[in-house]
Every structure is written in structure tokens, then in C-alpha cells.
Image (cartoon, grey):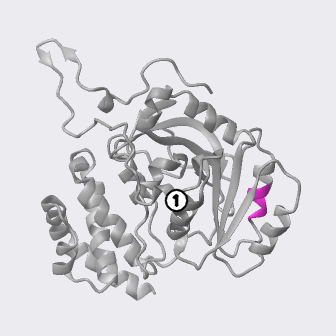
Amino acid sequence: MRPHEGDHRSPLLRGPKKREGGWARVNPFPTKISPDFTVHEGASAFPVMSYFFTVFTSAFNRADTIGRVYASLKNQTYQDFEWLVVDAGSDDTGRLIEQWQGEEHAFPIRCFRQENKGKHGAINFGLSKAAGKLFVMLDDDDECVPETLERFKHHWDSIPPEEQGMFAGIGVLAEDEDGYVVGDRYPRDVMDSTFQELAYVYRVRGEKWWAFSTAALREFPFPEEPEARIVPEGMIYHRLTRRYRFRFVNEILRRYRRDDRQLTKGNPGSHPLGNRIHLAALLDEDIQWAPYHPELFLRYAVHYSRFSFHTRSGLVRQLRGLRRGWAKMLVLIAWPVGLLAYCVDRMRA
């Protein structure tokens, strides 16, 4: 697939059009995106950008599966990249990485050992060490097609150089082990938009994959609460596209493994603090999008209350944890259902 000619921006990013009888309704949500990068404090300590890509893998007890990642990278048709691994596990993953570092291949492998701070903590650390212009996260049990980096570069280069500073990255599709697309396709084969518009206007769901601008992603580090082992990545992605655009492309580049050890499965109450932080951010920072998808925001409020109860935060504390009046109003409506969901979690635990 090749990018189409013309304006790839979604309708909400194009602005109003003249029609008979006056101007079309102006989108009430901010769409101007600054081309300027905010300089992260301490940015001078970041490595020089020596590669086009940093392929990042956070590894935790995955000696049995991380070989898929290594095999995928060895088969890449584009080789201007480094593989950066942050190992928080206690199995033989580190030994395997050391063995591969001694083998002959066209790309460098850098491995760092870190105390287990969750994947979000590993991402923060990886970003501080990354020497690639674009940052691609490849999970320790997944694979990608041989043309992955070549195609990511093609789509990035298709953005005019003078506009690349306004983009946070490229989004593509994933397939499962049986070759089926995971989740929904994007509304158009090539479109410039935001995560908010995808989620709330077009209601696109399901696993996707991203190549991020390293500089842009560094501006939005994950919060690292000592008790929060998991902070959903979507929290940072939504913050990214409040400032930048993303180019979304209907091209399958990742092979996604549905594995029963994935972080998204298990007891819903096992990681409540990270989920509460994520939902509070969505309610506070995306609330202006609620008219497009009110039922989703009501679910946000239910689950915010649910996970808050898991952290022993009553209704008063839940309301104090939010800044926006409309977000608090939703929680006032939804908290009884959240309390019920919390009680069901406790009974099933």
C-alpha cells in the first residue's frame, strides 16, 4: 500500500468549509498543533541520534519467547537501527542477549538491567538511552514482518520535512497468529489525526502498533508511582496527540501474540493504582470529547470509581482526585455501579 495523494488530515483537523448560507460549524475542540518541541529538562544528557530507529523491548522472564524478536530484527530489510533491551527478569533472558551480542549482525544490541518498575518504568528508562530518531516498541513475545522498519521509514518520509515536527509518529495495524487483523481498521487507508478522534469520533478499537518520534515521546514520561506496577500506555498516547498529530496507515506490520501471561489479563483488582491514574487522566484531559462518545466516558467514570475503591479511596477522595467539574459529575452518577463492580471483584478474588 502507498500513501494517497492529497490532504490526509481528518475532517476535524481541516477546519470549517464554506457552504450555502454561511460557514459550517467550527469544531469546538482545539485542533492547532504546535510544531515546536518542548525541551525536556536534562535533554542535553540524551544520546546523540545515531540511528533512524531504536527498537525497544522490555523483557521480563521471557527467555522462551524473546527469540521471536531477535529473529524478526535479523530479517529486517532496513538495518539502520539499534535494539535496546531493558531486562527486569530473573530467568535466562540476559544470558541470551549477551550471547546474541557476540553474534554477527548488522545492528547493535544494547541491554540494560533494571529493577522491575513495570513496563512503563522500562519505557522511561529506554527513552533516556535511545539513540534512534523513531522509537518502536516490540514486545518480548511478538514478531514483525521483514519490511517493518522500511515501511515505517517510508510513511515517515512521506510527511513533508517542514511538517514532521508536528507529528508524534506513525500508527499501523497488527495481525494475530492466524493472520486476522486485530481490532478495527482505521477509517481511511492513510489519515492524519489524533488518538482522541480515533477513539471518540470513529470509535476505532483493538490492538495497534506505533513508531514514535523519540523527541516527542520524551516530553511525556510515564508517572512512576512506587506502588503502580502497571500504568496503561494509552494515557501517554492521548497526551501526545493533544500536542501533535499522528499518521495512521492501514498496513499490517506486527504479528501479535495473544498470550495468557499478558498484562491486560488477570484479576482486575491486581493493579488498581495504575488504572486509576490512567482513568483520571482520561476523564480530566479528554472530557471535552464526551459528546461524541458519552457512554464510553460513563464507563471511564464507573471504572475510575471501581479502581479507586480498590485503592481504599472513598467517594470524597475520588472527587478530589479529579480537576474538571464535568468529570466529577460523571463520577457522582457512576460511583454506585463502580462500588458494585468493586464488590464483584472482591468476591471473585
The residue under the point 39% across, 28% down is 9
Using a 10 Å C-alpha cutoff, classify the residue at mark 1 as few (fewer than 14 neighbours), some (14 to 19) or many (20 or more).
few
Name the image quarter holding the N terminus: top right
Q: Position of residue 262 (x, y in %)?
A: 59, 69
The kind of secondary structure element at disc 1 is helix
Instruction: State the residue position of label 1.
Output: 45
Q: Which residues are magenta?
A: 66-70
Depth order, front residue of 297/100: 100
Please count the marks in the image: 1
The residue under the point 28% across, 68% down is 302
Relative to residue 22, is residue 289 drawn left or right?
A: right
Q: Position of residue 56 (x, y in %)?
A: 63, 57
Amino acid tagged 1: Ala
**Is residue 63 within the magenta segment?**
no
Depth order, front residue of 332/150: 150
Up-down: is 34 above or below 143? above
The residue under the point 35% across, 42% down is 197
Depth order, front residue of 110/64: 110
Name the image quarter holding the C terminus: bottom left
Q: Quadrant of residue 269?
A: bottom left
Q: Position of residue 271 (x, y in %)?
A: 44, 78
